[in-house]
Image (cartoon, rainbow, N blue to C red):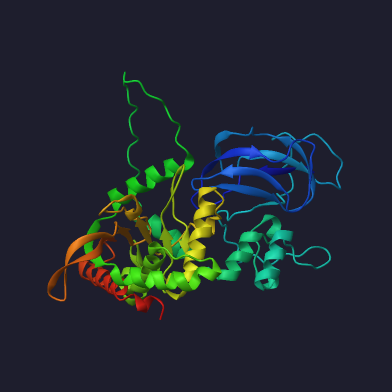
Amino acid sequence: MPIELKMPALSPTMEEGTLSRWLVKEGDSVSSGDLLAEIETDKATMEFEAIDDGIVTKLLVAAGTDGVKVGTVIAMIQGEDEDAAPAPKSETPKPEPVVLSQVETPTKVTQADRPLETSQDDRIKASPLAKRIAAEKGVDLTRVTGTGPNGRIVKEDVEAAASNAPTTNSAQSAPKAALAPSPAPVAAIDTDIPHEVIKLSNMRKTIARRLTESKQQVPHIYLTVDVRLDALLKLRGELNASLEARGIKLSVNDMLIKALGLALVQVPKCNVSFAGDNMLQYARADISVAVSVPTGLITPIITDAANKSLSKISTEVGELAARAKEGKLQPHEYQGGTASISNMGMMGIKQFDAVINPPQGMILAVGAGEKRPYVVDDALAIATVMSATGSFDHRAIDGADGAMFMKVFKDLVEKPLGLVA
């Protein structure tokens, strides 16, 4: 019986997407693991992968279609062991469940109370991709509850089991608890000034919505410190000389990411998220790094930054930034994070106030390092100084705690040996 291929939810917040292009055509045979389509979400262009074998009988949504709602039937697939037949109309009996899975994580449907279902030969019902990931990560599939059709275990089930995803429910409830009514739509502009109408990408729409919500709903408090960089720059030069043979070159931003992670661990009251009647206290510092891409801004995440070496951070930042600019980041690589850093110093910006990325509780805005008159050992001297401004969610973080955080961050940067200890 034909199988409905539906528009997937490639992230927990995705409600609609753009079907950028089909990678198959009608009549093509597809096998497990074959890529079927590219779908543009609010953050990236992602690939949609087949789980089982079959034949594409009908493409119902044209490539380039915007605003395709999650759950919309976009194609029909015929099993290879079935007689090829026209796709049934919507009024015919409901077809068998979908046997295709998303390459990325869809919105979860909790099925913890449902018993694990197995195939007729008592093997675990899991997609080939899920089995492959389980083997790589050492996940016991007998202990995983499938959320796919008929209890089938799919990729996201294995990844959730591998990470134990302890904060899933909290993370889902956090933004909901803090949401206020949506802002009124922006009125159209009527102008006789010569202009070009530029269609917003899904990413730009999301940026506009989320930043508006953040400034309307999150009471920001801003704290700024001037940080002397001379010792950090000296250490960076020495480290780069020793890392040259390995092809690694540390940036100042790499070292600031490490300092931010350590500061969050040392001042855990700032490593939090406001969640209505609750507050999430994170035990790990995952740093979202703002990266400018042609369609807007995305924040790939350096997980557990406090416990990673500077060389590891540098390598990960480079790899993530490159994939971000290609629109190839996986959802888990940019969704989450406990705090963010935005560095515009390389563009000569001396100081700025960044907007918090909910549900995170803070973001650090880093300005340019520049030569300034500075008091060193009670004498006026010339030093390389940068201004760093922390934006804090005042619902969750008191001013005194934010001030303590900024002091710890300043000390870590000015005495940088602590970053490699």
Q: Nearer the viewer, residue 20 or 152?
A: 20
Residue 25 point in image, percent of width and height? 74, 36
Residue 215 point in image, percent of width and height? 29, 49
The reply to whether residue 127 is visible in this rendering is no
Q: Image point 59% across, 54% down: which residue?
A: 104
Q: Image point 80% across, 34% down: which residue?
A: 86
In the image, residue 46 sits, relative to residue 339, either above or below, namely: above
Q: Nearer the viewer, residue 123 or 212?
A: 212
Q: Is residue 97 left or right of residue 349?
A: right
Q: Nearer the viewer, residue 111 or 26?
A: 26
Identify the image quadrant of the C terminus: bottom left
Q: Image point 72% across, 51% down: which residue?
A: 99
Q: Is residue 231 left or right of residue 167?
A: left
Residue 237 point in image, percent of width and height? 40, 69
Identify the image quadrant of the N terminus: top right
Q: Hey, which residue is sitting farthest top in the picture?
A: 192
Q: Nearer the viewer, residue 253 or 261?
A: 253
The reply to whether residue 386 is visible in this rendering is yes
Q: Hey, which residue is sitting farthest bottom in the picture?
A: 421
